[in-house]
Image (cartoon, rainbow, N blue to C red):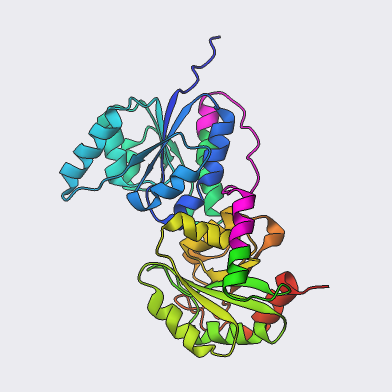
Amino acid sequence: MSTPTQPERILVIRNDKIGDFMLAWPSFALLKSQYPQAEITALVPQYTAPLAEQCEWIDNILIDEKKTGFLSDVINLSKNIRQRNYDASISLFSESRTSLALWLAGVKSRIGPATKIAQLFINRRLRQKRSQSAKPEYEYNLDLIKYFIHLNNDMPAATPPPPYLQFDSTEIIALRESLIKNHNIPDASRVVIIHPGTGGSAINLTIEQYAGLIKQLSGLGKIFFIITAGPGEMVRARDLSEKIQGIDHALHESKTGIIDFCKLINTADLYISGSTGPLHIAGALDVPTVAFYPSKKSASPVRWQTLNTHDRRLAIIDTSQADEDIFKIDITQSSAMIFERFLMTE
């Protein structure tokens, strides 16, 4: 019996939002561990490309340049894929345009979930039922990688543990020391990042809730807060800053790119937000995280669990069954939980 040919060029598709892309990093890690000699390319949009460049398990990046008009878009993408002569593709995020482009490009082994119309152009399908949100998104991604490995008659290697995103420790220490100096942060203070933005899609606490949370935490211990804002989020950040006057804090607007923002997150003792892209960056860095979730099934803490180790993450959920909001979360109770879990000093 002949040994299956090992894949040489693999295209992995995760071309949606930042948080979704970060939750694919364990998949890239497993795939590269399994096939270290393979050339792994990630199909990503331009805005996640800087993050992809930081992933040690990605060899090449193919930018998904969406064109106006479905047909011209698919033809352009298929040409870009065909030029690179991939042995296989794995669609961690499946959509009709990319699946059709893979078929037109002649990729022989096209792996993806059997959940959408897109499966018509996928010839190796795994039934997942992601809409049930029965497991974390990163596990759904890993299942597709393991399915690909089994198709090659191989046994999956162990998935590398977090952190998945790492920076030079000397640089991060120097950056933290610079923050402490610039903001006159007392040595005994804990640095907590609060990100009140929504990223345009995530359901988040109100500014009033975040202000209450900060006031409660500041009364429990020595904490310096950094309120962060991505593109288009500075209005919310300033609003929060105005509501906590008298409490030690600073505003940070991300102006120098996503990687510098990642490094800032890496300096924190704790990161707090809704289920946004930066939250999943913090998880990939294995920074302790607190995330607020609605009771809505598709936005649950099970489905959008962060990548950090178990004892470094805390999910707080609105149990009021009001799917579209998290306005009934008890801020006083949440503050006590957060402080006891992450900020209490002996």
Residue displayed at 48% across by 53% down: 130
Residue displayed at 17% across by 51% down: 68
Left or right: where 40 falls relative to 246: left
Left or right: where 343 falls relative to 142: right
Most foreground residue, 260 or 23:
260
Residue displayed at 39% across by 73% down: 233
In this view, which residue lies farthest toward the right?
A: 346
Q: Residue 90 occupies which quadrant of the picture?
A: top left
Considering only vertical position in the picture, is 139 above or below 61? below
User: Looking at the image, can residue 127 be seen?
Assistant: no
Q: Residue 271 occupies which quadrant of the picture?
A: bottom right
Considering only vertical position in the picture, is 81 above or below 184? above
Q: Give the range drawn in magenta.
A: 148-176
Q: Position of residue 18 (x, y in %)?
A: 43, 56
User: Looking at the image, can residue 72 be seen?
Assistant: yes
How many discs appear?
0
Q: Position of residue 131 (x, y in %)?
A: 46, 57
Residue displayed at 63% across by 64% down: 177
